[in-house]
């Protein structure tokens, strides 16, 4: 929590002013019953109408002053909390931008989004509440006690004896209710899960005619949820009447004892009325603060999640001595590279991988899922750093290069084609901002995307929805390729990026790549054997190790694994 | 080749359901409040007796708490001055006061206790009905709506109703009663003073209404900025890896800052304006307090009012102004819950999947002959997807469906399973028109293995058993063995008791495929529908899958949406589908010799596989 409080520092003036102004409002509120008791005791007592009017006017003035304080408090509280939220969000976003892939793996995309949106809002809301109500309630509480004691210490103390009891009860209920509501949440998650499964798995449910089974499964979860919710809510529901009863007992006590005191001349009637008013204010404040406290604890979870992101250690940082402008040709060498994802146990994902890719060569990487293909290529642009061994580009270790520079000479087409909302042109130009219109079209043509783009009524100005929802998988892949080509990289990496493109188009893309990327080192990951046949080198990965390296012809002669893959895909015996 | 997806495009969805962030809690307004209320009442109706008790409790409780200030006033009036306190009267008043408070606390407790039962029961039933309803809905319904949206109706909207039922309804009733009661008591004590206070309260209400109207504009501006920011966040973070690959971090940050700043400004404006209302209302409360005190004091001087009654009046005045705000808040909550209820009922009003005809026959001992006769079909009127399709599969035959993406292969599967009904023609299984048999019995005789192998978050054993619920553990293992899944299952630390995470993320694609095959084997269907997976499976598993599929296809009529050369060449019939028509049919060699579409397709897709 302290960590987040730092974000309020720039707005310290507002943070200070808000409670101060709230203090004004509270004091004004607290003065009212006392003034009123004067009306009764002095004004009514002596029949002085002038005094009553004078005091009444004073009270009106105080009410207006109180309002001014309240509004002022709101204004500063809003300014502080909104700026707090804005700054926090900005920092969070900036931090995420500096995340490495390993960091991104650790905190999933979905959860990062919730943290940036929902969690920040939660915390911001609590800051606002704290500056307004959480200050107001204790002030009212303490102030009320002070005023009550000032009027009549004995009566005040007797009637306020209920307060420790109330606090005790509240504390008991709150601690007891946490595990209960955690259980409710768990059951609710279960109900929602069954629900979601039935939505996503609807074809399976229908195909196997399992409606009745699912209904009874859901019914069980649903009943359990109801039972625990009823239990938890009823438990908490007891609190309110008990607290009310206690509070009213205090009022009754004041009235009863007040009678004796008035009789013995220790107190005036007006003061009894004022005391009753203060007691009600005190108890009201107490209830308000508990409610606020509960919502603040709920925000604690959000705060923790935000702090987790802020405290995330970056594993690939910018080294000040990192070099730039060292790569001229694009020769890639792997020297005994091993890799293991951080925090995972078991075998290395890559073990002792060594090979050389010369400028202009096309290197295909083939292997089973989980063999380490994507991991291997992710090491080149330093999305991850190798655990052991070295990766050299033109003889320079990639770890000695600035990641930004490194990535500017490498183009990666990721497995999942991610596009952004905006026009098609914007999306392709993402590859290189200063590209001319001709270059954009050229890249699109090379990626076999030009024709389908021109098929849209608005051509290159077609606006894509979020993540390019209005395109087919193959179209998205081709746009990602165009984007990568536009960058004119020294090293091009394609991670299974034509899987949704039909074979005819794929071979045309390959042909234009050959033409366009004559001097570029290309890495291609593919599942289909015919996508790799024409590569200069094929690396066959098996369980993280290089099983064989060679051209198609070599491998057909010598590689058992390669032959096996070939057979399974063509359904034929190798020659 | 992409997964075939010739389903109707995402239609407009439900009306009036745009929901940006959930932060402001504005759920929109219900369109047909009366109808929705009536239906909600129907759900509550089964518990009329409990409801009546709750109502009586609320009434008594509120009424008693209204008596409180009056009794305090009376008690104060017994204290005339030093040595002049009427203890008998004071004791009586204080005694009554204590009893009143005790009973009122008791009523609140009873009312809360019972209302929780009622509302939970209601929501449970609502959920149950909703779920049962969802089970009957057609595939078209699910395909044409985003799951998130539907999920939100099933969860958030129901939850909303729950909250309102548990809290707002009783509070609303109690607030209204105490509002009216306080007003009555105030009028009774002093009509003149009441008039004063009424004028002020109404003026305040008018003012806050005015402010609220202005803030609404600013709130929707804030909501818009919030939506924009959230959209930007979602897009950028989802595409974070691309941002990194293209070194666009700085740009992303600077764009974020612009949107973030805009939200900041809109937020400050909206929050400040709306934040004025509480102090304003507080001030109004104070003013009525002052008015009551001063005017009451003056009246007391003139002797038209006692001190105790001033005290009582002031308490009522407080009780009068407080619920006005509450009522406004609760009314908004009820409104948004009603809007939620309306969305829930909208789902309930969806037409169920095609019904069985009244005297539908039950299919038993299916031999597996399938005939399509002149079948026409379109997902939407006027957009035909299949045109005049004829085919005949003899029991035990394998039929391969090949053709380009979007040709209509998946549609044929959707029709055979009667997920959709055809527009013209007939589909016969064992000579019976499938529209005349019970849907469930038809589907029980079909086994379907889809490309997106859907598994449940349950143990592996239960997932396989899904194929036949009464299967013994031995039968489950047997099925897994036949499906080549046994060995990898055994290697898992918990074996068959391994609990799959949602969407079975802890298994590889290929392993999931094997489990779905085991599931289909266990269900032992006469007719099999297979959608072959295209890629993403490693070589070894691929071979296992092929063997398992062949095992599965043995002795059954099989329809295969084929992507593998081996499957196609071994098929008894190959149907080449393009543009919703079967344009060529025959076995592999016949079709090759024809030198038509298949020949071309084969050359472009499979020839290179052969050639390499």
Image (tube, coloured by chain):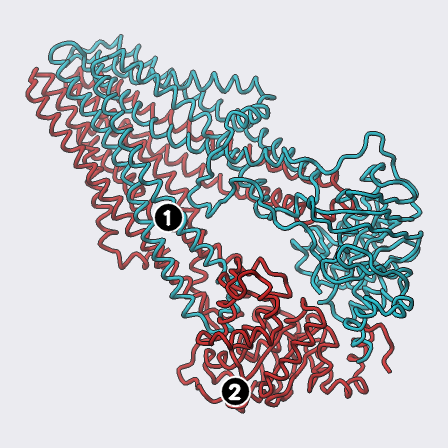
Chain colours: A red, B cyan
Question: Is there one chain holding both mark 2 and mark 1?
Answer: no
Do residues under tags 2 and 1 come within 8 Å of each other at their CB atoms?
Answer: no
Q: Residues within 10 Å of mark 2 (few under 14, many from 20)?
A: some
**Quarter occupied by the C terminus of chain B:** bottom right
Q: Residue at x 38, y 44 (%)?
A: B220
- Is A427 placed above or below A334 here? above
Q: Nearer the viewer, residue A154 or B69?
A: B69
Q: Residue at x 52, y 42 (%)?
A: B17
Question: How far separated are the C-alphas under marks 2 and 1?
Answer: 49 Å
Q: Nearer the viewer, residue B333 or A70?
A: B333
Image coords of residue A324 (percent x, y): 44, 86
Q: Residue at x 59, y 78 (%)?
A: A493
Image coords of residue B350 (percent x, y): 65, 36
- Disc 1 on helix, strand or loop? helix
Asked if one can make out residue A223 in the rendered structure from this viewpoint, the answer is no
- Disc 2 on helix, strand or loop? strand
- Is B104 placed above or below A114 here? above
> For this view, does A140 lie left or right of residue A113?
left
**Quarter occupied by the N terminus of chain B:** bottom right
Q: Which mark is residue B606?
A: none
Image coords of residue A276 (percent x, y): 25, 24
Q: Nearer the viewer, residue B63 or A401?
A: A401
- Is B417 placed above or below A105 here? above
Q: How many marks?
A: 2
Give the letter of the chain under mark 1: B
> For this view, does A84 lie left or right of residue A453?
left
> For this view, does A348 lie left or right of residue A61?
right
Q: Nearer the viewer, residue B163 or B553?
A: B553
Asked if one can make out residue A292 in the rendered structure from this viewpoint, the answer is yes
Read off the residue under disc 1: B222
Image coords of residue B312 (percent x, y): 25, 17
Read off the residue under disc 2: A397
């Amino acid at each position: 929590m302290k960590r987040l409080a730092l974000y309020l520092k720039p707005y310290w003036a507002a943070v200070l002013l808000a409670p101060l102004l709230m203090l004004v409002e509270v004091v004004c509120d607290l003065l009212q019953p006392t003034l009123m008791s004067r009306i009764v005791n002095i004004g009514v007592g002596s029949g002085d109408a002038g005094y009553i009017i004078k005091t009444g006017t004073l009270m009106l003035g105080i009410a207006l002053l109180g309002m001014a304080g309240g509004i002022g408090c709101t204004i500063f509280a809003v300014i502080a909390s909104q700026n707090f939220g804005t700054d926090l969000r900005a920092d969070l976003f900036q931090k995420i931008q500096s995340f490495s892939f390993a960091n991104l793996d650790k905190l999933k995309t979905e959860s990062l989004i919730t943290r940036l949106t929902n969690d920040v809002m939660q915390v911001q809301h609590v800051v606002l509440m704290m500056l307004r109500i959480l200050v107001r309630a204790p002030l009212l509480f303490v102030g009320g006690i002070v005023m009550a004691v000032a009027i009549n210490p004995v009566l005040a103390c007797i009637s306020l004896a209920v307060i420790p009891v109330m606090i005790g009860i509240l504390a008991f209920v709150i601690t007891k209710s946490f595990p209960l509501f955690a259980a409710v949440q768990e059951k609710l998650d279960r109900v929602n899960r069954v629900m979601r499964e039935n939505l996503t798995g609807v074809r399976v449910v229908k195909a196997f005619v399992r409606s009745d089974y699912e209904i009874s499964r859901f019914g069980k979860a649903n009943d359990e949820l109801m039972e625990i919710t009823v239990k938890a809510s009823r438990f908490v529901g007891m609190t309110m009447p008990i607290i009310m009863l206690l509070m009213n007992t205090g009022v009754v006590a004041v009235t009863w004892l007040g009678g004796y005191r008035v009789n013995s001349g220790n107190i005036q009637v007006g003061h009894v009325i004022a005391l009753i008013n203060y007691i009600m204010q005190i108890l009201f404040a107490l209830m308000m603060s508990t409610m606020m406290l509960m919502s603040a604890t709920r925000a604690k979870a959000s705060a923790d999640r935000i702090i987790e992101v802020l405290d995330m250690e970056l594993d690939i940082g910018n080294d000040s001595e990192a070099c730039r402008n060292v790569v001229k040709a694009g020769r890639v060498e792997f020297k005994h590279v091993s890799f293991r994802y951080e925090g995972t146990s078991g075998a290395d994902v890559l073990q002792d991988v060594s090979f050389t890719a010369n400028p202009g060569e096309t290197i295909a990487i083939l292997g089973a899922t989980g063999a380490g293909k994507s991991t291997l290529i992710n090491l080149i642009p330093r999305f991850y750093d190798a655990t052991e061994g070295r990766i050299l580009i033109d003889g320079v270790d990639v770890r000695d290069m600035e990641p930004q520079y490194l990535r500017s000479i490498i183009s990666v087409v990721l497995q999942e084609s991610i596009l952004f909302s905006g026009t098609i042109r914007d999306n392709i130009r993402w590859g290189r901002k200063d590209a001319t219109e001709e270059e954009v079209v050229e890249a699109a043509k090379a990626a076999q995307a030009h024709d389908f783009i021109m098929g849209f009524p608005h051509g290159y100005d077609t606006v894509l929805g979020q993540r390019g929802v209005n395109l087919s998988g193959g179209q998205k892949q081709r746009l990602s390729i165009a984007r990568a080509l536009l960058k004119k990289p020294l090293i091009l990496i394609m991670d299974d990026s034509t899987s949704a493109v039909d074979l005819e188009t794929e071979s045309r893309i390959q042909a234009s790549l050959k033409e366009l990327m004559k001097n570029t080192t290309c890495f291609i990951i593919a599942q289909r054997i015919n996508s790799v046949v024409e590569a200069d080198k094929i690396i066959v990965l098996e369980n993280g190790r290089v099983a064989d390296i060679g051209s198609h012809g070599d491998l057909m002669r010598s590689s058992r694994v390669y032959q096996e893959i070939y057979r399974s895909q063509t359904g034929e015996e190798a020659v | 080749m992409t997964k075939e997806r010739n389903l109707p495009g995402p239609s407009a969805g439900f009306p009036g359901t745009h929901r940006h962030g959930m932060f402001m809690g504005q759920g929109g307004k219900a369109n047909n409040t009366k109808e929705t209320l009536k239906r909600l009442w129907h759900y509550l109706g089964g518990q009329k007796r409990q409801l009546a008790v709750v109502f009586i409790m609320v009434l008594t409780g509120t009424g008693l708490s209204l008596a409180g200030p009056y009794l305090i006033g009376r008690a104060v009036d017994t204290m005339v001055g030093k040595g002049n306190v009427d203890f008998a009267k004071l004791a009586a008043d204080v005694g009554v006061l204590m009893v009143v408070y005790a009973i009122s606390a008791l009523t609140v407790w009873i009312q809360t206790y019972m209302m929780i039962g009622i509302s939970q029961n209601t929501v449970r039933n609502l959920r149950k009905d909703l779920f049962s309803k969802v089970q009957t809905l057609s595939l078209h319904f699910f395909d044409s709506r985003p799951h998130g949206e539907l999920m939100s109706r099933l969860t958030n909207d129901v939850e909303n109703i729950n909250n309102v039922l548990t809290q707002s309804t009783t509070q609303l009733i109690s607030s209204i009663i105490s509002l009216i009661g306080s007003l009555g008591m105030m009028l009774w004590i002093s009509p003149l003073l009441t008039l004063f206070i009424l004028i002020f309260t109404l003026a305040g209400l008018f003012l806050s209404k005015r402010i609220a109207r202005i803030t609404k504009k600013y709130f929707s501006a804030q909501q818009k900025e919030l939506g924009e920011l959230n959209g930007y966040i979602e897009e950028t973070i989802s595409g974070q890896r691309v941002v990194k690959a293209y070194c666009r971090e700085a740009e992303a940050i600077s764009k974020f800052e612009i949107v973030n700043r805009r939200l900041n400004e809109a937020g400050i404006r909206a929050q400040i304006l709306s934040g004025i209302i509480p102090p304003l209302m507080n001030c109004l409360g104070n003013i009525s307090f002052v008015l009551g005190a001063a005017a009451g004091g003056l009246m007391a001087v003139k002797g038209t009012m006692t001190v105790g009654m001033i005290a009582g009046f002031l308490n009522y005045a407080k009780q009068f102004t407080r619920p006005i705000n509450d009522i406004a808040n609760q009314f908004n909550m009820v409104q948004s819950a009603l809007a939620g209820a309306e969305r829930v009922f909208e789902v309930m009003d969806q037409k169920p999947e095609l019904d069985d005809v009244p005297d539908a026959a039950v299919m038993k001992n299916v031999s597996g002959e399938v005939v399509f006769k002149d079948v026409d079909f379109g997902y939407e009127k006027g957009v035909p997807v299949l045109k005049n399709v004829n085919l005949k599969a003899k029991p035990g035959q394998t039929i391969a469906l090949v053709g380009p993406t979007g040709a209509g292969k998946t549609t044929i599967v959707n029709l055979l399973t009667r997920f959709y009904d055809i527009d013209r023609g007939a589909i016969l299984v064992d000579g019976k028109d499938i529209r005349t048999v019970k849907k469930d019995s038809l589907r029980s005789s079909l086994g379907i293995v889809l490309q997106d192998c859907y598994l449940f978050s349950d143990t592996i054993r239960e997932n396989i058993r899904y194929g036949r619920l009464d299967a013994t553990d031995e039968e489950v293992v047997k099925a897994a063995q036949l499906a080549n899944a046994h060995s990898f299952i055994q290697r898992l630390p918990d074996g068959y008791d391994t609990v799959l995470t949602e969407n079975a993320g802890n298994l590889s694609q290929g392993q999931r495929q094997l489990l779905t095959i085991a599931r289909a084997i266990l269900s032992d269907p006469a007719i099999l529908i297979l959608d072959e997976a295209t890629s993403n499976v490693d070589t070894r598993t691929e071979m296992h899958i092929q063997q398992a599929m062949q095992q599965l296809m043995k002795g059954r009529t099989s329809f295969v949406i084929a992507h593998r050369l081996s499957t196609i060449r071994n098929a008894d019939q190959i149907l080449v589908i393009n543009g919703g028509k079967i344009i060529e049919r025959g076995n592999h060699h016949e079709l090759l010799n024809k030198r038509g579409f298949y020949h071309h397709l084969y050359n472009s897709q499979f020839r290179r596989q052969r050639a390499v």
